[in-house]
Image: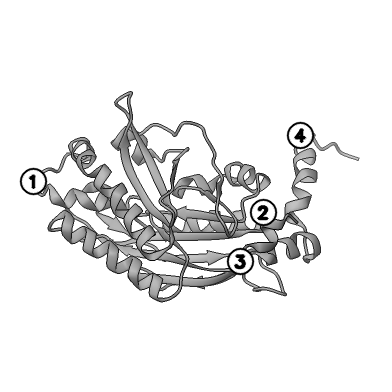
Amino acid sequence: MTSSQKDRPSIIKVAAAQYPIDQIASFLYYEDKITKWVGEAAAAEAKLLVFPEYSGWELVSLFPEEKDLASQMENLQTFLQKYIRLFSSVSQQFGLHILAGTFPVKVESGTYRNRAYFFGPNGSMVYQDKLIMTRFEKEKLGFIQGDHQIKIIRTEFGSIGINICYDVEFPFIARKQALAGAEILLVPSCTDSLAGYSRVRVGCRARALENQFFVVQSTTVGTAPWTEALDENVGSASIFFTPENSVIQNGVLAGGNLNEPGWVYADVDLSLIRQVRSQGQTLNHLDWELHEKLCDRVITEYPTNQ
């Protein structure tokens, strides 16, 4: 263990949003809403906040006559820098690390990325693009995958990875992050049905089990009939860990009520990761290498009569 690891806090309070999509009257209204949400979590002594996927898309309600998705995305670009400045400001104001959900960002090629911005209390910022697109994103929004960069964010309390919604349903992105030192995986999500929400939730729990680290899922809730992208929102936020007798047997540290707006909080003890990875009932993280070797090839056999 390095001296920096010894000095960092072992326990950090995280807050995962069950974030309601509202009709926004003005950007000032949006600023007030975000500031109140962040202030509430800060008052509860949370240090790491997670907003959901597409929470930035809420701003399309400022264009009430525009129903076309492509035009909505284009119009949203006028608010991108304000969006970034807002979350940078509140993270510094309250002294928090904040994942600001995701925003559709137009890049130089003219295509769009589903981008999650992460802000630190010192004014720092980094982003993670979504890597695997859903059918809706490919067929309706014309999104392309991110720039192939799987990132790790170093903070004073530990290393963080981000899997945006559908990304968490595939194991190797999170696995690369775990091997690079990630201790907390943030999963901003947006799902329009119980089935979709359940798929992402199962992915979160599976990644927590395989890598023996913490997974924080946030969700959008409510309805937004003014945009097809967020017309229905189903979900609840949760904080997961690998099931372990000495920690939590079902692996769910905290979970909210389905479709109910609010924060879900949990105290995350990062020292437990080292404990369960070396002394746990199972050693999933260490045994992954054996798993990979066993899966190098598959043999097809045809049963024969004896």
Residue type of the residue flagged with mark 4:
Asp
Residue type of the residue flagged with mark 2:
Asn
Q: Which residue reaches farthest right?
A: 306
**Picture mark count:** 4
Classify residue 203 as left or right of residue 164. Answer: right
Gap between marks 3 and 4, in whole Å? 40 Å
Q: Residue 211 got which mark? A: 2
Name the residue located 8 percent from the left edge and 46 percent from the top edge.
Answer: 65
Given residues 14 and 301, the one toward you in this image is 14
Mark closer to the chain start, 3 or 2: 3
Is disc 1 placed on a helix, strand or loop?
loop
Name the residue located 29 percent from the left edge and 26 percent from the top edge.
Answer: 110
Return the x and y of residue 283 as percentages of the image width and height: 77, 58
Residue type of the residue flagged with mark 1:
Glu
- According to the picture, the residue beneath numbered tag 1 turns out to be 65
- According to the picture, the residue beneath numbered tag 3 turns out to be 9
Q: Residue 164 got which mark? A: none
Return the x and y of residue 111 as percentages of the image width and height: 32, 28
Classify residue 225 as left or right of residue 43. Answer: left
Mark closer to the chain start, 1 or 4: 1
Return the x and y of residue 196 as percentages of the image width and height: 42, 54
Which tag is nearer the camera, tag 2 or tag 4? 2
Residue type of the residue flagged with mark 3:
Pro
Q: Is residue 61 visible?
A: yes
Gap between marks 1 and 3, in whole Å? 49 Å
Given residues 166 and 254, the one toward you in this image is 254
Question: Residues at badges 3 and 2 in contact (C-beta under 8 Å)?
Answer: no
Above or below, comparing residue 258 to residue 113 in the picture: below
- According to the picture, the residue beneath numbered tag 4 turns out to be 296
